[in-house]
Amino acid sequence: MRIAWIIARKDLALRSRDRSVFVIAFVAPLALAFIFNLVFGGGGNDIGQSVQFDYGIVDRDDGPVSQAFTEVLEAIEADGLIAVQPFDIEPDARAAVEDGTIDSLFILPSDLSANITTGLPANIEVVGNVDTPTSAGVAASIAERFASGLAAATDAALTAVETGVIGPDEIASAAAEAGAQPPVAALVGIDAGIRLLDSATFFVAGLSIFFMFFVAGLGVTSMLEERRDGTMTRLIAAPIRRSSIIGGKALSSVLIGLVAMVTLVVASTLLMGANWGDPAGVLLLIFAAVLAVVALMSFVGGLAKTTEQSGNLQGIVAVTLGMLGGTFVPIGDPTSFLGQLRFLTPNAWFLRGLADLGGGNIVDTLPAVGVLLLIALGFGVAAVSVARKVVSA
């Protein structure tokens, strides 16, 4: 074991002077994750993150209908979904939308209640910012839902007038009161047992394990380089067990992988606000994932005869498993064929373990950790077999 540590230390010293390793292991995954999150994530659209839209309202009507609409907004605001700011001057409100102070604006015309009472057309104007289309769409849906409810309530009020239940002067108040009533049925949210990762964590986790495939193959590539340069012959001639040579090479890859992954977790948490969950669970998943990837790539690289062939094979496998495992884009339907096929990759199990950890505790990560360790064991045995051929060549 002491000899394996010496060989690992020697390889680590060599790799520490290789700038490409530093870029692949640290810079590239963090930089790409930041760009991906900026382009495809953020904006409060992440699963598991709260969403709140800032709305403004200009009430020029101040009648029963506008009061009912304001009460609807207050009810939604109480649920924490929106924040409503009243404006007295319409140009100021429109300027607030343009400069991004608020996302969207409701404008209630002065004849809103009067038109509703007399059966004339009435409109609630929604002004949205072009940079926040989702917010504008939600605002329009709120106005449309209120209008449809108000139309039904107005029909009911007119029917009540015709039957003598209420007087004509009570149409507006009756319609507004009926329109503000909650629906008979409502959709409610429930907490799922397993949540999806927020965008920042997802992209960092996916890209870190993707680039780990390129770092993990350095051990077997190093053996091929030493065989090419003739230094492997000297190692074989020395009183050193071949298992120590293989173990030292693998150990250096594992150590680089662990340091890279832990560094990315800390950096993404501080710089991007990534939410990884329980540190103990994260470390357990990282350890299992690094072992699995190192074993897999050591086996793939050991099948080659030259360093160039090894790099090409490892690149093909890394990209294929990255695409299949949902590293770059989440797999939409987990019950589909592709959704099930992705669990043949360590990428998918690592991401699954992090999602389980976010929705529970360290115990929930054990299935993913178990599969990753099985992958490490299976490919580790195969990697030792092909590595012995490289060492004996």
Image (spheres, helix red, strand yellow):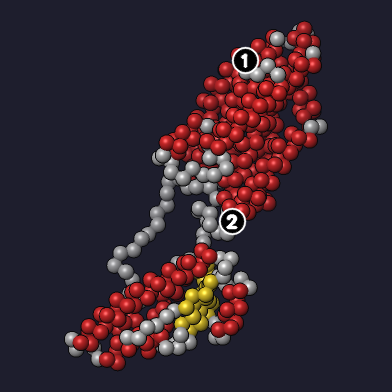
Counting from the top left corner in percent of width and height, residue 246 is at 68, 17
Is tag 1's residue or tag 2's residue first in the polypeptide sequence? 2
Q: Which residue is mark 1?
A: 386
Question: What is the number of the mark on residue 212?
Answer: none
Q: Is residue 352 above or below residue 195?
A: above
- In the image, 64 versus 273, the foreground residue is 64
Horizontal relation, residue 337 to residue 243: left or right: left
Q: Is residue 203 above or below residue 310?
A: below
Looking at the rendering, in which quadrant would you find the N terminus? top right
Q: Is residue 120 visible?
A: yes
Mark 1 Cα-neighbour bin, 10 Å: few <14, some 14–19, many ≥20? some
Q: Is residue 279 visible?
A: no
Residue in view at x 68 percent, y 51 percent: 271
Counting from the top left corner in percent of width and height, residue 270 is at 67, 51
Secondary structure under the numbered disc 2 in the rendered image: loop
Counting from the top left corner in percent of width and height, residue 49 is at 52, 56
Find residue 259 and report its image quarter.
Answer: top right
The amino acid type found where label 1 is placed reads Val
The amino acid type found where label 2 is placed reads Gly
Looking at the rendering, in which quadrant would you find the C terminus? top right
Q: Is residue 35 above or below residue 123?
A: above
Residue in view at x 62 percent, y 18 percent: 303
Residue in view at x 32 percent, y 86 percent: 119
Secondary structure under the numbered disc 1 in the rendered image: helix
Counting from the top left corner in percent of width and height, residue 379 is at 56, 22
Q: Which residue is mark 2?
A: 42
Residue in view at x 61 percent, y 29 percent: 316
Mark 2 Cα-neighbour bin, 10 Å: few <14, some 14–19, many ≥20? some
